[in-house]
Amino acid sequence: MIRNKWKDLIAAAEDRIAAAAEEMSTWLWSHPEISDQEFGASRYLAEKAAEKGFRVTIPFAGLETAFLAEFTIGGEGFAESAAAPAAPAADHAAPAVTAPGAHIPTAAFLAEYDALPGYGDLSPDGSGNGHACGHNWIAAAAFAAAVSLKETLEELEAELPGLRGRVLLIGTPSEETWGGKIKMSEDGVFRALGIDAAFESHLSGAKGFCLENYMLACTDIIYTFHGKASHASAHPENGINALDAVNLTYAGISCLRQHLRPASKMHGIIVKGGQACNIVPDHTVMQFYARAAKRDYLETVIEKMNNCARGAALMTGCTVDIERNRYTFADMRNNGPLMQSMQESMEAFGITDFRKDDINTAVTGDIGNISYEVPSLYAIFSTAETGNGADIHEAGYLKVTDSDYAHGLLHTAAKSMAASALEIVTDEGVRNAVRAAFEADA
């Protein structure tokens, strides 16, 4: 458990930047940029981090709208070492850290900042985009936590001779679409940064605060069927109906559901069904999302779905092209000791209403991929008490994500993440317990 004095230092540090964090949340909310277009948001966050004394690399890890902000105490920073990640190779290889045996206890805070499209006149800047998922809040909370931890470590340096620690603020783009964290994970970025614990917090309209959160592994698949066109009345016998193949695939996948493990989900649409009613469709396209509780079982689900498409093609005489998304979202590997540390921190800052997550209503996020790379914590902060009744992605939630109530939760989230991260950095026993739990779940 973090010492009360240190908790007070964290709280005081966050109080000092509270106004700046709220201003950040509001600025991001007012300038919503969708995935792969977060040029303004990423540079705004990077500049603010640099102003607070972080060494900043942008772009980072081969992504134009990703960034790394780093502060190190009691050792060389990445930008000072021969193994700096500040200039990744042309092939975007993962950055290297300091030499073996020179590990510096490291806590990372993850910022998301891509908005969603489709909110029309409710968009604050007229673009149609909006932060109905609260990524403005996520980024501001991560920033406030990183700065609070940095300033607290600086205050403790005199009290704790030999103190070593590293604070990272990592900008991770495109969570709402293809998942920037997935590419960064596959490239080994998070492991190479030597992270002992990664933290992220998210708003939710559901009741209760939650730490043991489920994420479903997920990817999407496009099935394209090729048949043969003919006049649907004069010579239907000459046609090969690609729409029939779509319908049979859809029916086959629907029949699969009762034979899959719980929490496995498949949902799809017909993207292209034909050109005209009096022409036998010769080219059809359908898209499906596949989800499962674990990413290894997701592969089983996908193969069963693909067999449905192959069977439909065989039955109709069509051919089928199967195109799977390059990136696969992983499930969330929760870490018991890290959750315990975070819960104690949240309780110290007044949060007592905790709930357990329900896998049957779980969604998908790219932090799951990070949880396979380094110990990770994903905290849900409830806005249910606002009485708004809306939840993430809904138009009504736009009013919540930069409200005064959300600002209050922002400060609690930042203080809690920073306090738990301070425990990770300064307490070798806690750090080792977190690592042991991570390795046991491998």
Image (cartoon, rainbow, N blue to C red):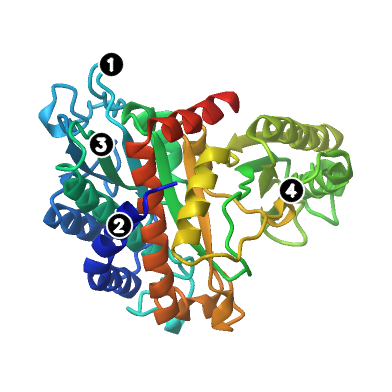
Instruction: Tell me where residue 229 appears, x and y as whole percent.
Output: 73, 46
What is the spatial separation of the Cα atoms under label 3 and label 2, in whole angstroms? Answer: 15 Å
Instruction: Tell me where residue 225 appears, x and y as whole percent.
Output: 70, 41
In the rendered image, the vertical position of residue 335 relative to residue 390, given as above or below: above
Circle 4 Cα neighbour tier, 10 Å, few/some/many (<14 / 14–19 / ≥20): some
Q: Earlier in the sequence, mark 3 or mark 2?
A: 2
Between marks 3 and 2 in the image, the one whose residue lies nearer the viewer: 2
| Residue pointed to by mark 4 | 265
| Residue pointed to by mark 2 | 10
What is the spatial separation of the Cα atoms under label 1 and label 2, in whole angstroms? Answer: 29 Å
Q: Earlier in the sequence, mark 1 or mark 3?
A: 1
Q: Earlier in the sequence, mark 4 or mark 1?
A: 1
What is the spatial separation of the Cα atoms under label 1 and label 3, in whole angstroms? Answer: 14 Å
Circle 1 Cα neighbour tier, 10 Å, few/some/many (<14 / 14–19 / ≥20): few
Label 3: element kind: strand
For badge 3, the amino acid type reads: Gly
Residue 165 image-quadrant placement: top left
Along the line of sight, the residue nearer the viewer: 152 or 257:
152
| Residue pointed to by mark 3 | 165
Q: Earlier in the sequence, mark 2 or mark 4?
A: 2
In the rendered image, the vertical position of residue 151 relative to residue 440, given as above or below: below
Label 2: element kind: helix
Along the line of sight, the residue nearer the viewer: 116 or 310:
116
Residue 101's tag is 1
Between marks 4 and 1 in the image, the one whose residue lies nearer the viewer: 1
